[in-house]
């Protein structure tokens, strides 16, 4: 059976107001109001954008979606979990301040920003699932306590996960710190003798896991959180992992954490993928104006998290005329892995019908 995925064409040149109106039209056309009941605590799951990043989905883009939820008399809150790496989203206080600076707050959206995994990322619920890798996953406590979810994902590439879209936003982005650790633990990175000692990875590593000696850089595996940012930044290809097996385990684990985060909300969630400013790396990078790897496409939405990601992948590849793996400069990565695994564990269907909205 195929799932319905709705699309409306859009570009960042439309400006925030028009983008917000288009997202709202998509919400209405898709009939997504059926997922949200009066008095639901509704998590509007976003990525507020790392400090310095400029390509994330901006707060004004989702104002129309928030207004829809308010008109349905739900109790929406905008939300994102704390990060493993040390930065401005590492704890709830700094994260809320950054969210407010980026407009994800009462002033900007008319709803509060709430960090769902507590002050330091340890407020969690152990959720039993029938996964192939995990039988129990650790999800941010307030994600498991709310009644419905409206997910807003920015479609990007990702050095280790291949595709950054809905499954990653829900799987990684709704996990507690322990849940994130479980997913990233799949990656063991190594530095080869191609290292030129340029020091970029050392300067950037958010976990202070990299040291330099006279010969090359080294990774302290006990400190490394597996974020793969060093790998994305190394211009000399000196940082590698086991592309086949390890990225596959990471991606499958992301899909299984998404299964846990959505448990009990199977008919109570809607997923928006914004295909605007599609970059090679995700919004955790603090780099301004990251280069687009494909021109803007629009916004897509569905109640099926697998279908909406498969549609995103297909649209990116169709628009660019290239495989996403080629756009990422890493033909070894399987960019369909999260989608295929999500389908195999009953999270959704990769068969979809694309319905265009004016
Ligand atoms: S970024 Fe690459 S070349 Fe530079 S120090 Fe790190 S591993 Fe070596
Ligand atoms: S993956 Fe690289 S950047 Fe990330 S924590 Fe480990 S060593 Fe640091």
Image (cartoon, rainbow, N blue to C red):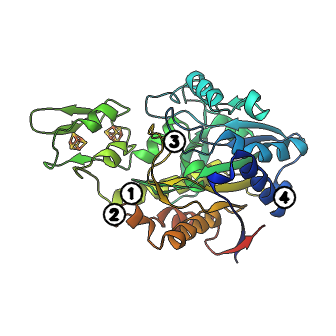
First in residue order: circle 3 vs circle 1:
3
- Separation of disc 3 and disc 2 at Cα? 22 Å
**Local crowd at mark 1 within 10 Å, few (<14), some, or many (≥20)?**
many
First in residue order: circle 4 vs circle 1:
4
Which one is in front, 194 or 119? 194
Mark 1 lies within 8 Å of ligand 2 (Cβ measured): no
**Residue 265 visible, this angle:** no
Assess whether mark 3 and mark 4 are in contact (beta carbons under 8 angstroms). Answer: no
Q: Nearer the viewer, mark 3 or mark 2?
A: 2
Q: Which residue is mark 1?
A: 247
> Ligand 1, what quadrant?
top left
Assess whether mark 2 and mark 1 are in contact (beta carbons under 8 angstroms). Answer: yes
Q: Which residue sits at x=41%, y=57%?
A: 249
Q: Which residue sits at x=68%, y=48%?
A: 15
Q: Which residue is mark 2?
A: 244
Please tell me whether mark 2 sits on a helix, a strand or a loop: loop
Q: Which residue is mark 4?
A: 28
């Amino acid at each position: 059976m195929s799932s319905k995925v709705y699309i409306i064409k859009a570009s960042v040149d439309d400006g925030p107001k028009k983008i917000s109106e288009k997202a709202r039209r998509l919400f209405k056309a898709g009939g997504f109001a059926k997922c949200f009941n009066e008095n639901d605590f509704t998590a509007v799951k976003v990525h507020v954008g790392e400090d310095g990043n400029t390509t994330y989905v901006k707060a004004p883009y989702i104002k129309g979606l928030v207004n829809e939820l308010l008109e349905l008399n739900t109790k929406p809150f905008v939300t994102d979990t704390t990060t493993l790496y040390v930065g401005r989203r590492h704890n709830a206080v700094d994260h809320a301040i950054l969210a407010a600076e980026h407009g994800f707050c009462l002033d900007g959206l008319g709803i509060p920003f709430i960090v769902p995994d507590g002050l330091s990322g340890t407020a969690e619920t152990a959720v039993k699932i029938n996964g192939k890798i995990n039988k129990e996953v650790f999800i941010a406590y307030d994600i498991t306590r709310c009644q419905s979810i409206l997910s807003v994902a920015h479609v990007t590439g990702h050095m280790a996960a291949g595709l950054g879209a809905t499954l990653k936003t829900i799987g990684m982005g709704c996990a507690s710190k322990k849940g994130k650790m479980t997913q990233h633990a799949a990656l063991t990175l190594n530095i080869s003798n191609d290292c030129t000692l340029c020091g970029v990875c050392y300067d950037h590593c958010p976990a202070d896991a990299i040291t330099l000696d006279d010969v090359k850089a080294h990774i302290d595996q006990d400190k490394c959180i597996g974020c793969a940012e060093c790998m994305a930044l190394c211009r000399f290809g000196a940082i590698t992992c086991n592309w086949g097996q390890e990225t596959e385990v990471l991606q499958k684990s992301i899909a299984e954490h998404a299964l846990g985060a959505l448990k009990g909300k199977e008919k109570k969630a809607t997923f928006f993928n914004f295909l605007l400013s599609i970059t090679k790396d995700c919004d955790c990078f603090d780099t301004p104006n990251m280069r687009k790897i494909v021109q803007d496409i629009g916004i897509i939405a569905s109640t099926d998290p697998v279908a909406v990601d498969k549609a995103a992948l297909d649209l990116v590849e169709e628009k660019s005329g290239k495989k996403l793996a080629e756009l990422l400069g890493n033909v070894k990565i399987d960019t369909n892995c999260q989608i295929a695994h999500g389908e195999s564990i009953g999270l959704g269907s990769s068969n979809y019908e694309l319905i265009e909205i004016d």
